[in-house]
Image: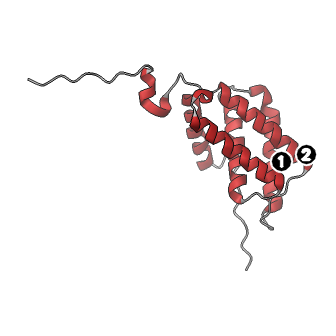
Amino acid sequence: MKKSKPRRWTANPLAMFGALDRVTLVKDAGSDNVKMRIVAHDALDMLRQGKATRGHLQMVIEAINMAETLAARYNIGRDWLPEILEAQACVRALAERSVKINKYVLKGTELNALNLLMQIHDSQLDACSIYTLDQAVAYIRMRIGANQVLVLPTPEVSA
């Protein structure tokens, strides 16, 4: 006869599935949530100061793609979609303008659009569950493969 083992018990049964937690909001996720926001805001701050690298711009692009996906597909902040698309156009213009010189310098209107975008993105994360965020990441990855989201162009190499 087999010895019986007690079942694993958690207060939130969905929590044992990690990122598939349908109940917990991102804002309640603790240090990971704080770390994610600090990195995104730091990237915007480096852009603001004119010290941004390609990695900083990539982080801002990821925030834009997430904001667009949460608004358009998951109806989280859908009324802000025009402002999100405006920020996307600003970053696209910045990336195209900066490809040759490999320096990222914002214009005033672009900075205003990106500041608003980051506020929208933070509000969306406050209203989003971890499960929805995980679904949105998978959806964005699928759209990157289909070339349907904003991606950073590769820099030109001078010969």
For the question of whether residue 93 can be seen, the reply is no
Circles 2 and 1, Cβ within 8 Å, touching? The answer is yes
Amino acid under label 2?
A: Thr
Left or right: residue 5 compared with residue 61? left
Q: Residue furthest front?
A: 31
> Helix, strand or loop at disc 1?
helix
Question: In the rendered image, which residue does mark 1 sit on?
Answer: 90
Name the residue rendered at 90%, 45% in the picture: 109
**Does residue 24 lie above or below 54 as drawn?**
above
- In the picture provided, is 104 more to the left or to the right than 122? right
> Extreme bottom residue here?
159
How is colour applied across the structure in the image?
secondary structure
Residue at screen point 84% across, 57% down: 105
Q: Residue at x 76, y 47 (%)?
A: 44
Q: Is residue 2 visible?
A: yes
Q: Who's the residue at 86% across and 46% down the image?
A: 111
From the image, tell me which residue sits under label 2: 109
- Image quarter (top left, top right, bottom left or bottom right) of the C terminus: bottom right
Find residue 41 and report its horizontal and vertical position in percent.
73, 44
Q: Residue furthest left?
A: 1
Disc assigned to residue 4: none
